Amino acid sequence: MNVKVGDIVKFICDYEHTKNEGQVLRILEKVNGMRPQLFLVQSHGVKGPKQWLRPSRIIPIISEG
């Protein structure tokens, strides 16, 4: 899956135990031994308007930005 900034994606929200969707605002690349690749997604969830997600939490790309 090739997610880019601006894409609308569907993802699994661990906090709400639901599937949600939102727009990718920023991508942090993987740093060996320090952090995995992360995506900052803006959505309308209970946890807040923005969430950092691992690639395994993103299901499909709904539309490309």
Image (spheres, rainbow, N blue to C red):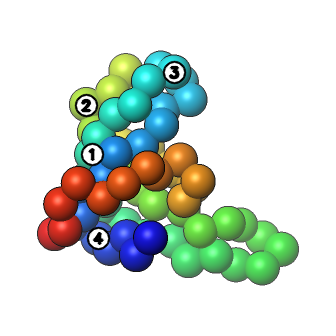
Q: Are marks 1 and 2 in contact (CB under 8 Å)?
A: yes
Quadrant location, the N terminus: bottom left
Q: Quadrant of the C terminus?
A: bottom left
The kind of residue on which mark 4 rests is Val
User: Circle 1 sits in a helix, a strand or a loop, which is it?
Assistant: strand
Amino acid type of the residue tagged 2 in the rendering: His
2 shown above or below 20: below
Q: Which residue is identified by label 3? A: 17
Q: Label 1 to label 4, Cα distance in Å? A: 11 Å
Residue 17 placement (x, y as % from top left):
51, 21
Helix, strand or loop under label 2: strand
Q: CA distance from mark 2 to mark 4?
A: 18 Å
Q: Which residue is mark 2?
A: 44
Label number found at residue 5:
4
Residue bearing the label numbered 1: 22
Where 25 falls versus 3 (above or below)? above
Q: Earlier in the sequence, mark 3 or mark 2?
A: 3
Image-quadrant location for residue 50: top left
